[in-house]
Amino acid sequence: MNLSMKWLGDYVKADMPVKDLCHALTMSGSKVECFEEEGKNISKVVVGKILSKGPHENADALFVCQVDIGADAPIQIVTNAKNVKEGDLVPVALDGAVLPEGKIKKCKMRGVESFGMFCGLDTLGLTAHDFPYADPEGVFVIEEDCQLGQDIHSAIGLDDTSIEFEITSNRPDCLSVIGLARETAATYGTELNVKAPEFKGVDGDINSMLKVDIHNTEKCQRYCAGIVKNVKIGPSPRWMRERLRASGVRPINNFVDITNYVMLEYGQPMHAFDLRYVEGAHINVRNAKNGEKIMTLDGVERELTDDMLVIADEKKPVAVAGIMGGEYSGIMDDTTTVVFESAYFEPSQVRQTSKKLKLKSDASSRYEKGVDRLISMTCLKRAFQLVEELGAGEVLNTVIDCDYTDKTPASVEFNAEWINNFLGTDIPEADMIKYLERLEFKVENGRVIAPSFRIDIGCKADIAEEVARIYGYNNIPSTDFRGVARAEFTEEQKFARTLRNAAVSLGGYEIATYSFVSPKYFDKIRLPEGSKLRNAVKIVNPLGEDTSVMRTTTVPSMLDVLSFNYNNRNEKACLFEISKEYLPASEEKPYINGDTLANSGEKKHKYQYSLPDEPQRLTIGMYGGNCDFYTMKGMIEQILAELKIDDVEYKRASDCEVFDEKSAFHPGRSAVIVKNGVHLGIFGEIHPAVQETYELGVKTYVAKLCILEMMELAADKITYQPLPKFPATTRDLSLLVDEDMPVAELEKAIKGAVGKILEKVTLFDVYRSDDMKKSGKKSIAYSISMRSHDGTLTDEQADSAMKKALKALSAIGAELRS
């Protein structure tokens, strides 16, 4: 929000230095970003009058002018301007003048001395919108009342200061000059001078010329309309153009400028229609029809849906409510009758429509934050007052006001003791009431009644904030902490830290991804159509489709990051993430009412919802660096060993019904981890089709481990085991097995056959020769470590154990490789 200091001075005394004002308003809650003094980079430019204009003796394209600048004698200026003549008033940059383009010095032009330069609009940093009568290509011929030699700043109104504010979304009342004047008056304790607008009008019955119907009173609670006849379209007066320019708004014509002026002044967006283009002279505020189209003022044709609100005549929409008008119903140069609109549109519907149409405007930015629902008629009257002041037409003295607003003011309990305890202050109650009254609050019968423009007031803390900012945050005493809060990690946090340290020690790099994802992820990982994971929690107001649902699986998030690294030429990656999935509640849960969350007891929420399950997962992803299925399996085994989870089983993922993500994995190179019937996770090589979708040109491996399930199975205590007294005996087995034989079945057979003397089974080689591939075989090699706690194992005992192992392996189709 840009604020003109001149405009501010209409409503409150503002003669303090601009730096002091900016600091004071920032400290009272209205943050100032910066301020700019117009024309600050322009000096030694004055108004001059051309006394004569003659040809240059050495150049046909140049002219020699004698110019009166209010000094004792005229000065000579050489120019190539063809649009100036004798008697014109022009801006003259004197010798030594500073302009945005540089410094001016006297010089000779083709042998003739020139003691200055005429200035065009662009030279002064202006445009034709600031002075519509001026030639945008030539010298600026001034048509304003000014004196010879007068400084150009005061001559053309280039002497204002514009302050830029950062207005937060909860304070839409400050998106107006009067709102900021109100803040200034409250901050300095001075009087606010805002008079109710008045207009004379001419006799006439508006109901005989226009009809208004609101068909959706929830989305449009008030609609005021008035008519101006015999309008005179033209440029706005200089003072209005200057204020609009200082506020960052481009002047267009008097009627468009009036609507913008009122919006900036009061914060109430307005719109003006050409009555002849309103079919049937009937305005209908209604929901759009699916497929209905409108060409908006920006020249873009937009297709509407039935959840959007429009202003329509009897045949078509003429405006998107609260956002932008239609191109063919706007003010034209030949317009004779204008309809002014001043309305209150429900903020959420404006926000949603603006987002769907990808259409933003000054009006929508105010409506979607919330405007004062009680000032629609006041602003309509102000527009009529300006029309009469500018002599731009005849205003009918009757208006239409369709009003369905709830005029009950917001009120909050007033408790001075609670406020002091909350702020850590000792402010007298009388002072608190005085501060609140300066902000136009009322204190009656133990309650604070908020003014209609303060839509952000909902609880006692809001009232405490108002007191604090007028009292002065710097005046609140600092208080030392009275104790040290003791905090400890929860068991879940400790477990997650153990997992994190284990993953890092194995070479993993931690990542963090968004919980909001695109529903397209389901198709990217080939998730079955009927999968429960497709039932995702939807975001009510998403930033876009890519963040419109909460993830039900962490696998796509990991694949996204792996793809990003691979396509940025990282040859290898080993990443992990500890994060949550969000699964709609699997069973009925008691609803949580929004009212219980806002336990301040003042603000009501109309939504109820059941929270989703949020299981925590450890997700690991890797590619490159000679990694394979067994690299991932080894990493998982190390993590499980760190957690003291042993005797787990590895089963085919394709046979598992627990993890729907199995569709993302290669059916023959993936497994699930199971212990005592509890599924701890899934891992393996990503399916070639999924790798192609994610543009991964190498084999990629991902694991998803269930943290809660692992935590429940992890050993609570570490049991002391003495160092072995007797040496271990090692035997190697090289087996020839079918290609689809899971190694988990081989290991299970070995463990069962060797018995209690088995210490460790280690897979150290997987080999496939060309002949093996043709016959559908592969070679698996194990190192088997055996140890007895009763004595040293003999060769006979070890050989006997190996014979038992080979017998058990033979029973499942494995044979000793020769």
Image: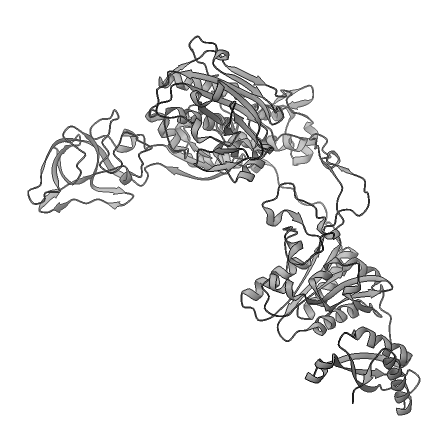
Q: How many labels does the image show?
A: 0
Q: Which residue lies furthest to the left in this view?
A: 57
Residue 173: where, in percent of width, then height? 53, 29
| Quadrant of the rendered image containing residue 599 | top right
Residue sticking out furthest to the front: 774
Quadrant occupied by the C terminus: bottom right
On the rendered structure, is 31 left or right of 386?
Answer: right
Q: In this view, does 416 lie to the left or right of 676?
A: left
- Determine whether, in the image, residue 7 is placed left or right of residue 731: left
| Residue 768: x %, y % from top left | 70, 81
Q: Identify whether 505 is placed above or below 526.
A: below
Q: Residue at x 24, y 36 (%)?
A: 45
Compared to residue 619, the image places residue 810 above or below, namely: below
Name the image colouring.
one colour
The one nearer the camera, 118 or 646, is 646
Q: Quadrant of residue 41?
A: top left
Q: Is residue 758 above or below residue 153?
A: below
Horizontally, is 40 left or right of 302 in the view?
A: left
Q: In this view, does 303 lie above or below 702?
A: above
